[in-house]
Image: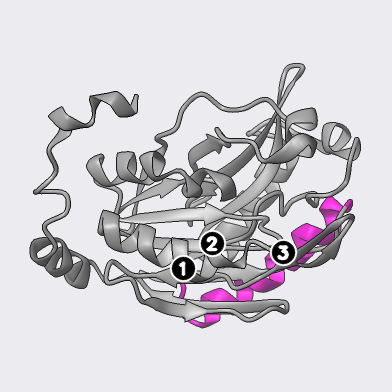
């Protein structure tokens, strides 16, 4: 399944402009044969927008979700994107996966909030394992900091996730996460990991890009640089199956020894 990663911060504070950016990227991704387009954390509104987070937050089935479903249908590909989700008076840092026919497949709420700014504006989610079937694959969703906790990725591996999509807003000086940790997560859990980051300056943050699709051999199939970019690479089910057969990590686990971890 060809997967496109949209490395962009869009236009912080403007949902309308970000929908235009997403629409244009979906057209380019579809022309390149992609079946899935992934956009970064909080792509719909911007990340460092302060109190506008609460003002711009929408329900999972809100107007913007409808607009993105229309984009997905018109271009014939699935879309995963980050956004602030409003549920009553509560706001979550969420990511949603929409199919190529416009149906909502999965919605994930970030479980591990990073720093004071996130804790000020968001409530952490309570469901760590969110999956959907797409193109014959089991696709899981996390957001940024979540993937830095090995327990999260291992739970997905044990539940059969083939492709872990991770919308991200990671900033300087944590480049090692994209460069080293993400490929290791893919290797140790025998899955593909699509890590799609924001880029450039936004508020007090400098997002470093380096989005990547890492394979179960720990090698990035594609990696973006530090500017706005759309990169594409394939998730190969046959290679994944062969890699899982050859790599003994999951088979050689001894769960009875790990009780003290929780």
Q: Does the magenta stretch include residue 7?
A: no
Instruction: Name the N-terminal-most of marks 2 and 3.
Output: 3
Residue 73, x across and y down, in percent: 55, 58
User: In which quadrant is the N terminus drawn?
Assistant: bottom left
- Between 146 and 55, the one lying in front of the other is 146
The reply to whether dot 1 and dot 2 touch (C-beta < 8 Å) is: yes
Q: Is residue 164 above or below residue 228?
A: above
Q: What element carries label 3?
A: loop
Q: In the rendered view, how is the structure colored?
A: one colour
Mark 3 and 1 residues: CB-CB less than 8 Å, in contact?
no
Q: Residue 172 carries which label?
A: 3
Q: Name the residue under label 2.
A: 177
* 248 lies left or right of 142: left
Question: In terms of secondary structure, what is the magenta stretch mainly?
Answer: helix
Position in image of residue 146 (x %, y %): 52, 43
Q: In which quarter of the image is residue 186?
A: bottom left
Q: Is residue 231 visible?
A: yes
Q: Circle 2: is it few (<14), some (14-19), or many (20+) Cα within 10 Å?
A: some
- For the residues labelled 2 and 3, the Cα–Cα distance comes to 10 Å
161 over 176 or under it: above or below:
above
Secondary structure of the residue carrying tag 2 is helix
- Left or right, residue 43 beside residue 249: right
Q: Give the secondary structure at mark 1.
A: helix
Magenta-highlighted residues? 13-34
Taking 117 as reference, is 188 left or right? Answer: left
C-alpha span from label 1 to label 2: 6 Å
Q: Nearer the viewer, residue 82 or 245?
A: 245
Residue 180: image tag = 1
């Amino acid at each position: 399944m060809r997967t496109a990663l949209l490395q962009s911060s869009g236009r912080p504070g403007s949902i309308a402009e970000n929908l235009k950016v997403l629409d244009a990227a979906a057209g380019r991704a579809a022309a390149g044969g992609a079946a899935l387009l992934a956009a970064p954390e909080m792509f719909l509104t911007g990340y460092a927008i302060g109190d506008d987070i609460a003002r711009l937050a929408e329900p999972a089935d809100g107007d913007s979700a409808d607009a993105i479903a229309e984009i997905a249908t018109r271009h014939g590909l699935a879309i995963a994107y980050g956004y602030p989700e409003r549920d009553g008076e509560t706001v979550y840092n969420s990511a949603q996966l929409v199919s190529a026919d416009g149906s909502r497949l999965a919605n994930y709420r970030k479980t591990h909030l990073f720093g004071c700014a996130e804790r000020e504006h968001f409530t952490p989610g309570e469901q760590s394992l969110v999956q959907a079937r797409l193109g014959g694959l089991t696709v899981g969703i996390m957001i940024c900091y979540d993937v830095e906790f090995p327990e999260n990725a291992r739970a997905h591996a044990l539940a059969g996730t083939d492709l872990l999509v991770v919308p991200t807003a990671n900033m300087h000086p944590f480049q090692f996460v994209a460069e080293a940790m993400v490929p290791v997560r893919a290797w140790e859990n025998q899955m593909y990991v699509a890590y799609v980051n924001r880029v450039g300056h936004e508020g007090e943050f400098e997002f470093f890009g380096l989005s990547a699709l890492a394979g179960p051999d720990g090698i990035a199939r594609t990696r973006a640089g530090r500017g706005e970019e759309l990169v594409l690479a394939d998730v190969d089910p046959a290679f994944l199956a062969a890699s899982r057969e050859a790599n003994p990590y999951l088979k050689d686990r001894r769960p009875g020894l790990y009780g003290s971890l929780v």
